Image: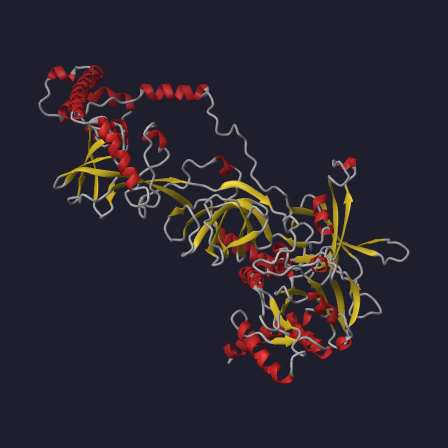
Amino acid sequence: MDRRHKANQLRKNKKDMVLTEKRRLGSRDGPPHLAAVVSLHAAVDAGAITKLLRGECAGGVVHLERCVSGVSDSFGLILPRFKQRFTFLNQSTADVHSLLDVAKIADSLVFVLDSTEGWDSYGEYCLSCLFAQGLPSHALVCQGVSDLPVKKRVESRRALSKITEVRFPDARLFPLDSEQDTTLLLRHLGSQRQRKLGFRSRRSHLLAQNVTFTPNSPAEGAGGGNTGLGTLCVSGYVRGRPLRVDRLVHISGHGDFQLSQIDAPSDPLPLNLTAARPVKPGKGGDIDMLDGGEDDAPVRVLMKADPSCRESLQAEAEVDPMDGEQTWPTETELLEAEEARKNKRVMKVPKGTSDYQATWIVDDNDEEDGDLDEESSDDDGDDMMDEAMEGDDDENNSQDPGSCCASDEEEDEEEEEVCSTERAGADQRYDEHMDEAAEEEGLKRYREARSNEMFPDEVDTPLNAAARIRFQRYRGLKSFRSSPWDPMENLPLNYSRIFQFQSFERTRNRVLAEAAAEEEGAMDGWYVTLHIVDVPFSVMESVQSGKPLVLVSLLPYEQKMSVMHVLVRRHPSNMEPIKSKEELVFHCGFRRFRASPIFSQHTSADKHKMERFLRPDAPTVVSVYAPITFPPAGILLFKQRNDGIQDLVATGSLLSCDPQRVVLKRIVLSGHPFKINRRSAVVRYMFFNRDDIMWFKPVELRTKWGRRGHIKEALGTHGHMKCVFDNQLRSQDTVLMNLYKRVYPRWTYDPYVPLPLPWVKRECNVEMDDSDME
């Protein structure tokens, strides 16, 4: 009974919480319901929809015109009958980036469809972007149904519903030709279930409704004027989580900035038209009164930033270039090295013993007299070695170990000279039977015949350069899956500028849990003014050009640079090849930036093969230097063409933040079997000198038909080599050698601000006049 009662209480609390959150939106205690009107067809006019919504439908009162900064066709609507308030804006689809920014923060989207076709090709393109980013609650409307004959209205609506059910299987279609239809639409928008988008529900965000810019004075360190920095005052309704003054804010397309204070002016869209609702102070926020003008109400200062507690704008780690320099050893280190040299024990070991094998030889004196010091051990070392070795006489006991080692070195040098002389003679005899002109002509014919049949990642060995120099950064792997690769080896200089978590998942869970439990700051639904310091004037120019301004409060560590990995799929509409390290435009959550990523395969191994191009048939991991963002977050990749139009390349989601993810680039060197024996073959055209063959001798070989082998020896001085395989080769087979090196993205991160483009309807033969461009 207790367990059943507890489950009922939890179910009831959750239901009450959902109902309270649903009723807050658009009510007196919450922000106005933000709805964006979006046209999906070139033949429909979204302005007619907003004009109809401005009418006296459902007893609505238009209380505020142009209530969204940068959007001329926007207004605030109060419905006393429903006890709700709305903010409508007509968002043009000409600028896809502005459309996506508004969709990130809008509560509902009103899609305007054509009564016969639904949407055109460019409307399909916009829907693809919106679905990939995360679609909020929406409604479908169309006009012109009442103009049809009565007998054809049902048939027209049925045909349009069949078109829309591909994208919106459960959506209801609203005809919008009268005030009664408008009332039904407003009732639906106010009561429909709100979709939660993960990247915005965990952060506080705000759509600018009033923006002012004050240049910094010369005494504050800025040059002043339109080209310098200044303080940007942005007013709007707080949405999502509470907004804290000590957190950084991100302006989409412009970068990260700090807050100096948060004010609480009067609500411009009060549900009670007689008086504006005062804003209650937040916990830990001091309230000061600032006198306004004669006609202005006094402004409350909710919070002021404490410089000691405010988060830093530092995005990169501070690097001292002298940290890695080699310094001269100190006197203490020199004395320690001299003592170690004096106390070094010289052991007499059998000829041919390596240094590694010599370390495992233990003297009997060490086992019996372990408590004696090093000097006594060195004195008796020769005697104990003589007892252990059979066949040594008394003269050998008194022989100097240094002279013995010297004689062994001389013998080794003599043997090497004899071997090199014999090898040179063998190479000369082999080269006498080789026709160099025929060899060059055969290489030319071989490469021409294989020019259209080359394996993926196959490269030609250069003729005028040594392969061991050209491919010195590459190495061979016995097994790509199980061979070790140290992720901290030979890191580039850019890795000293980034940050790394010991456990990204643990940090993410902790940060999101702390953000969900926060109750300090400007609460959801408050109308506030944010004072953002050191903002460039280009932000104000963007607002003046007609672009909406979207702000979001960043979570801890989200201003730091690191290596981010996103999982994407190629968009079906894009057919052009996308090369690795090509500059792309990223939409990652609320961020928008340019970067040059690398592509790799999505596997569960500790090493991942780099892809030279974005594959159309499989998911691909995109790695890029970018600010840290905690998932979930939608990802969109765009490529800008020469004419300024941007194509949607790929869509996906944020994967992780891991600088130690190893991405390996593979190259394949190929050779041709010249003479084939039962288990061996002479291979040519892979290398062109003896030193290269000896350099790559430890690397395993494979063939097109599945044979495996290794290089046994070099033949001559022109690149012929004898190779041994696990089975006999075929004459049409090709010998391959795989080499790998680790690759990293390019550091080209830059917050992206799209340039104002003309009205473009892609693949739509519709001419737009000046009124449509407005």
Question: In x, y percent, where is residue 129?
Answer: 55, 59
Which quadrant holds the C terminus?
bottom right
The image quadrant that residue 206 belongs to is bottom right
Q: Is residue 483 above or below residue 193?
A: above
Question: In x, y percent, where is residue 513?
Answer: 56, 58
Question: In x, y percent, where is residue 380?
Answer: 21, 21
Q: Is residue 531 above or below residue 21?
A: above
Task: Tell me if I can see residue 613 in this picture.
Answer: yes
Question: In x, y percent, where is residue 523?
Answer: 69, 61
Task: Tell me if I can see residue 310 in this picture.
Answer: no
Q: Which one is in front, 713 or 767? A: 767
Residue placed at 24% from the left, 34% from the top? 442
Left or right: 746 in relation to 644: left
Q: How is the image coloured?
A: secondary structure
Q: Residue furthest right?
A: 294
Left or right: 457 in relation to 8: left
Report the number of numbered marks.
0
Q: Is residue 168 above or below residue 501?
A: below
Q: Residue furthest bottom?
A: 151
Q: Which one is in front, 521 or 92? A: 92
The image quadrant that residue 389 belongs to is top left
Left or right: 256 in relation to 619: right
Q: Which one is in front, 600 or 649? A: 649
Q: Is residue 439 above or below residue 535?
A: above
